[in-house]
Amino acid sequence: MSDGFMAKSIDRQIVLPWSQVIRISFNALRARFFRSMITTSTLVLAAAFLSYTFAVYIILEGVWSAADSALQDKILSAGFTPADGHFGSTAKDRWLVVLSLLVCAVGIVNAQLMAVTERFREIGTLKCLGALDRFVIKLFVLEAAYQGLLGGTAGSILGVGTAVATLWMRFGLPVLIHLPALDLTALLVKSSALAVGLSLIGVMYPAWVAARMQPAIALRSEP
Amino acid sequence: MSGNGAHNVVRLVDVTKVFRMGQEEVHALRGVTLEIKAGEYMSIMGPSGSGKSTLFNMIGALDKPTSGRVFIDEVDVAQLDAYELAWLRCRKIGYIFQTFNLIQVMTAIENVTLPMIFAGMGRDEYMDKGMELLRLVGLAERFQHKPAELSGGQQQRVAVARALANDPAIILADEPTGNLDLTTGEEIISLLKELSQQRGVTIISATHDIKMINVSDRVVWIRDGRIDRIEDREKLQVSVGQVL
């Protein structure tokens, strides 16, 4: 019976559609909010440092051309020096940012490894229910993406916000009037994306380890 | 799958399992040969450390034997790839654990429906069936509760409902009453017995709960990684005295 054959081939599938992955990992993150905030805080700090560093130069660049000579003097005397009439990050700034991202990457791998280890039993259970290795990876990767997005966005806003606030206090209203909103938004997007990237890099190894475990071994671990 | 002359749903042939603990080798199973018929209610009894749980993991395809073969529905588990193994765990076997192992961040209904999502069911279908199963175990009105908001007995009921999600041929229970008080334990046992009688599900339970003997068709006694003896229901009536 051809009908029966079809039914059988449908029967044989094991699936976890992305819509379910999105729902399950979002709920998991919400239910474990404070625990995941600890993991996420590393990303917040990295994104904040990065976006603060670059935001200062972007804002100065926007203000500089519109500033009168009194304000320009004020900016120069505050220790900011334009190169070829433009403000931009120095080699030292970039070096610091790279270093901070490296430290963050190590921190994230560590935090994710801890978070995944805490959930070995849950992973074992999922596998008993018929989850494939890649379902486990999917779930962890998406959770990490959420964490990256959340931490990255929060950190970027924090960094850019701090840059705007400090420069405003130092140089006054022109900073707000000539704020290069578009460039700052681009910075927000970029540094959030970087945080997502970092978070994904951090979770890859722990998720891979978790997904490959025999269910019996995963279940044996203490919660 | 009921009645006499039922086929072997599980068959173990000379299964051994050796764990390595540093320099030491621990022989958890030392050659177990066992046949379990479809529709049977079987208990694996033995003191802790006797290899019960290891045997449970072998029957459930949750761990690989060091040597020997495990057949489920006459299919050699060692021959299955990861995908087929997942399919087997999803469709053929329902697992119940001493520690319930519900997913803590999910509600009762989400826990019960997860295996059906894996099996590719549509939302309406799995929600209907999930509610029906929760009703069967008497927890329909608590479907939105998380495990932490349920008592031990209620959590184990959710686990039973989850084990039934994809109409498995086998339910494997590892010390299902181990973390429950006497009455709640009895409730879970009679629930399992009902399922075995009404649905013809094969129930295999590793336990050291004597209450389990009363409902078992067969009891396998394990000692030091070997089968000590296998007792049938008739014989059990003599040794236990009162049987339901």
Image: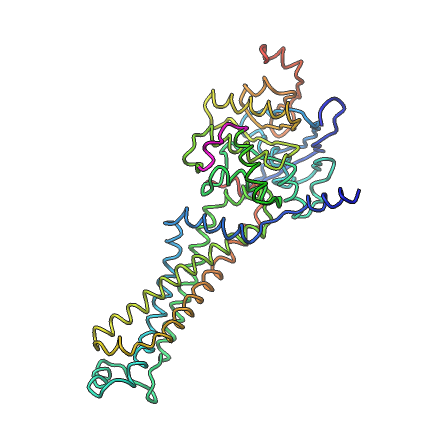
Tag count in the figure?
0
The color scheme shown is rainbow
In the image, residue B103 above or below residue A203: above
Residue B97 percent coordinates (x, y): 53, 33
In the image, residue A95 above or below residue A192: below
Q: Residue at x 41, y 47 (%)?
A: A32
Q: Is residue B20 visible?
A: no
Q: Residue at x 45, y 23 (%)?
A: B181
* Left or right of A96 on screen, residue B169: right
Queried whether the magenta region covers residue A67, the answer comes back as no
Question: Split into 4 quadrants, where in the image is the C terminus of chain B?
Answer: top right
Residue B233 percent coordinates (x, y): 66, 16
Extreme residue toward the right, this view: A1
* Left or right of B31 on screen, residue A111: left
Residue B63 percent coordinates (x, y): 61, 40
| Nearer-the-camera pick, B208 or A28 | A28
| Nearer-the-camera pick, A100 or B228 | A100
* Left or right of A180 on screen, residue B157: right
Residue A34 percent coordinates (x, y): 36, 49
In the image, residue A115 above or below residue B224: below
Queried whether the magenta region covers residue B142, the answer comes back as yes
The stretch of residues the image draws in magenta is B136-144
Question: Split into 4 quadrants, where in the image is the N terminus of chain B?
Answer: top right
Q: Is residue B78 visible?
A: yes
